[in-house]
Image: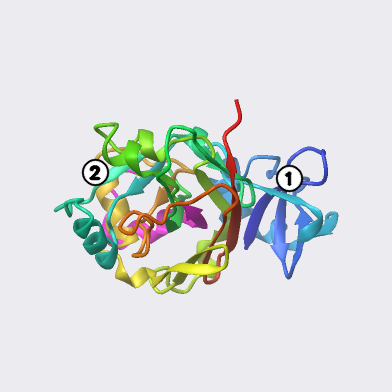
């Protein structure tokens, strides 16, 4: 299934099922309501009713898609987790970590799949990172690698927008440079795990104004998504709706200084999951 949060005009946010260019309102299905995060633990049970729902239907272009998960408890990202990206980062003076390197993206950075990205006045080093985002479906702790797929609800396209000078120079941790408002666009919908044969064999691509900057596949991860879940759950309990951004491939702007500018249109897409597209706008106060 592909599940989205959406609204029609200025109407309230609803939950919908996406099929063939249309979205069908499923908010009135018993047990669904208006929070996609809240139904994740019961998604398998609710699936037959969701798939059979025949609520009001709209063309996708007639609705506003919102962030599929707007209220996770945690939004975590792993740094330098693609081999070629780790090499380009090393060439730019960023040492390659010897273990999994995790950071927080504060949840206030989350934006919708077509919402603008704000270029902050305090930096001219606004960068992009297409990433496969994993959404946790079950409360879990001490998950073995071989059991990790069972706790995944589904997947999103993410752009792990980064403010490089705040990331590498102006803060001793990654958190500030990864957490500016609007710098976590995700979407366009949640694609449930059963729709994807192998999440470690997906092509991902990012373009700026139509020029492809990143074009790679998820099989280049240093630590795959199951190893990531096993590692994290040694430390913390992952909760339904938690988002894990699983790393970006080579082609970011930092090594060449090709940073984002006001007016740029950034499109990130992953096979089987769809695409998000965000315009860079100036900060207003």
How far across and how far down the image is residue 135, in percent?
A: 47, 51
Contact (Cβ within 8 Å) of mark 1 with mark 2: no
In the shown orientation, is residue 71 left or right of residue 114? left
Residue at point 20% right, 50% down? Answer: 94
How far across and how far down the image is residue 143, in percent?
A: 30, 51
The answer for how far apart the CA atoms under marks 1 and 2 are is: 36 Å
At mark 2, the secondary structure is: loop
How far across and how far down the image is residue 205, in percent?
A: 48, 68
How far across and how far down the image is residue 237, in percent?
A: 34, 38
Q: Label 2 belongs to which residue?
A: 234
Residue sticking out furthest to the right: 56
- Which contiguous range is marked in magenta? 141-159
Between residues 147 and 159, which one lies in front from this camera angle? 159
Is 240 inside the magenta-drawn segment?
A: no
* Residue 53 makes an appearance in the image: no
- Residue 150, by quadrant, is bottom left
At mark 1, the secondary structure is: loop
Tag shown at residue 153: none
Q: Label 1 belongs to which residue?
A: 30
Residue at point 68% right, 45% down? Answer: 32
């Amino acid at each position: 299934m592909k599940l989205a949060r959406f609204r029609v005009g200025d109407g309230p946010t609803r939950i919908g099922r996406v099929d063939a260019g249309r979205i069908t309102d499923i908010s009135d299905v018993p047990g669904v309501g208006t929070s996609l995060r809240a139904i994740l633990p019961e998604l398998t049970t609710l699936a037959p009713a969701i798939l059979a729902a025949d609520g009001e239907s709209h063309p996708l272009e007639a609705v506003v898609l919102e962030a599929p998960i707007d209220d996770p408890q945690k939004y975590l990202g792993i740094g330098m987790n693609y081999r070629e990206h780790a090499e380009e980062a090393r060439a730019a003076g960023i040492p390659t970590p010897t273990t999994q390197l995790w950071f927080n993206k504060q949840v206030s950075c989350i934006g919708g799949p077509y919402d603008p990205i704000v270029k902050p006045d305090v930096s001219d080093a606004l960068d992009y990172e297409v990433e496969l985002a994993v959404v946790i479906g079950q409360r879990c702790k001490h998950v073995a690698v071989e059991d990790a797929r069972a706790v995944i609800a589904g997947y999103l396209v993410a752009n792990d927008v980064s403010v490089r000078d705040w990331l590498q120079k102006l803060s001793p941790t990654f958190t500030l440079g990864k957490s500016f408002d609007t710098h976590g666009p995700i979407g366009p919908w949640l694609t449930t795990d059963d729709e994807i044969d192998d999440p470690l064999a997906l092509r991902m691509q990012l373009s700026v104004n139509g020029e492809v900057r990143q074009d790679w596949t998820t099989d280049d991860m240093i630590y795959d998504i199951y190893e990531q879940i096993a590692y994290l759950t040694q430390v913390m309990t992952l909760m339904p709706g938690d988002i894990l951004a699983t790393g970006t491939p080579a082609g970011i702007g930092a090594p060449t200084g090709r940073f984002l500018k006001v007016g740029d249109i950034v499109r990130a897409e992953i096979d089987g999951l769809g695409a998000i597209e965000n315009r860079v706008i100036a900060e207003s106060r």
